[in-house]
Image (cartoon, rainbow, N blue to C red):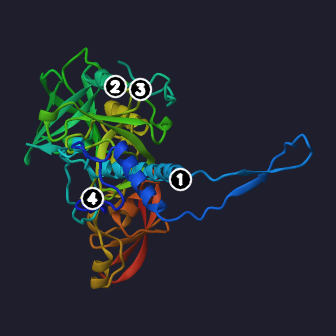
Amino acid sequence: MTENPWNHDEDQPGFRPYSADGGDTASDIEAVANDVAAEILDGPSDTEEISVESQEQPEDGASIAISTPNPPRGRRKQLLAGFLAGVVFTTCVSAASIGGFLALSRGELPWSRNAQTASSVLENAPAVITQIPAQSSSSINSGKAVTAVVGSGTLSIPEIAEKMKNSVVGISTSSIYGTSTGTGIIYSSDGTIITNAHVISGGRSITVTMPDGTTYEAVVVGSDAKSDLAVIKISASGLAAAAFGNSNNLVVGETAVAIGNPLGLEFAGSVTAGVISALNREVDVDGRYMTMIQTDAAINPGNSGGPLLNNRGEVVGINSVKVSSTDAEGLGFAIPISDALPIIQELISEGHVTGRPSIGISGEELSAQAAAYYNVPQGFLVRTVTSGSGAEAGGLQAGDIIIAFNGVTVKSQSELNREKDRCKAGETVTIKVFRTTNDKEIDLRIVLSEAVG
């Protein structure tokens, strides 16, 4: 916590803070000013008389000199004292005004002295970008462009909350690790609901809680870990489907509203608001790059899968990721809805995303320190090769270290995935590996498989 540079225990020189118990008033300041002026005027006056020539001529034609006498000594004192009093009074009032402002900022004014302020001590810790963990314990307008113009069809935040109150649901997922909760968005009135893939990952059973408290068992229609999107279905009809906007038309600085169930269903329907902080942020999440919308609307565990809304109350993003750090706040990220809708529609029709490339391996990246320790190149260490995959057919082996993909050097899982995702399933690529069994670099030709899930 940064220490306040203003010393609250010492008055500032030149003025006293305003006190409701009878501090300085305008009359007090004027009296002080008069006293100061009087002290300045003590002692003999050395002012000389001023003589001027009159422009009038006497009747006899002779010019005469008219002297303008100095005012009596007491009168001079009075006039000068008044002038100095005005100067001192103005200075004192200005100082008092500044003092009042500082006192207000320091919380010293009578009406602010009893105000309680909350503070937190931040500890140094590295920032980590993670998916928002699930908390333990109408029609679709996506085809129409939306112009974000303030004052044209915009809603207030209470109006946005009212519009969406029946379109956001709670999702509880039971797994071998316990029960976790997240948020979902009603996609269509027939019970189709969208959320994050990590909200339902590993679930043995999924329960949807409606805004009125009614619960339904849900089945998984499709899930895609790469995009962190999933579609589930409940046996219901006549539901209030959310309206979907166009995230391509968002403007940095416009209103952003998040609705969800932070920290569990006891806080269901929580509304937080902020702005669109940035667009097209490339975020590394668990070894894969995602292009996302950044917002400072508060997003917490349990908000995963919930909507990020524009100033028309339209879904423009699906909340998914936040920065976890004691040194940062207001760094949340949402999947742009214009990117998500095609995937959602494919999950509904196919159950998975088609045409996505896969090498057919699993493994881990070697850090620079580990590579130096074992005297091998830095890259992606292959642990297993999927049977029947293009990797197996192309000669990749467990223990190989992938160091380049199609001529581009890769040193991490994120870099490898980025290059792979530039390709399509069925495409032939060149992968350079360091073979640890003979300490040689070799080039392999691999036909990419189609990824599922």
Q: Residue most toward the front?
A: 60
Q: Amino acid at mark 4?
A: Thr
Judging by the rendered image, the residue that carries numbered circle 2 is 160
Q: Amino acid at mark 2?
A: Ile
Of labels 4 and 1, the one closer to you: 1
**Left or right for 361, reference 311:** left
Judging by the rendered image, the residue that carries numbered circle 1 is 80
If you read the primary sequence from the N terminus, does the residue marked by circle 2 or circle 4 appear first?
A: 2
Q: Secondary structure at mark 1?
A: helix
| In the foreground, 408 or 170 | 170
Give the alpha-carbon distance from disc 1 to disc 2, as whole Å.
66 Å
Of labels 3 and 4, the one closer to you: 3
Q: Residues within 10 Å of mark 1 (few under 14, many from 20)?
A: some
| In the foreground, 309 or 152 | 152
What is the quadrant of the C terminus in the image? top left
Q: Residues within 10 Å of mark 2 (few under 14, many from 20)?
A: many
Q: Residue most toward the right?
A: 61
Vertical relation: 287 (above or below) 138: below
Q: Secondary structure at mark 4?
A: loop
Judging by the rendered image, the residue that carries numbered circle 3 is 312
Residue placed at 26% from the left, 49% from the top? 107
* Residue 299 coordinates in the image, percent (x, y): 27, 43
If you read the primary sequence from the N terminus, does the residue marked by circle 3 or circle 2 appear first?
A: 2
Judging by the rendered image, the residue that carries numbered circle 4 is 386
Of labels 1 and 2, the one closer to you: 1
Looking at the image, how many numbered discs can be counted on the residues? 4
If you read the primary sequence from the N terminus, does the residue marked by circle 1 or circle 3 appear first?
A: 1
* Residue 41 coordinates in the image, percent (x, y): 48, 60
The part of the image, by quadrant, that contains residue 350 is top left
If you read the primary sequence from the N terminus, does the residue marked by circle 3 or circle 4 appear first?
A: 3
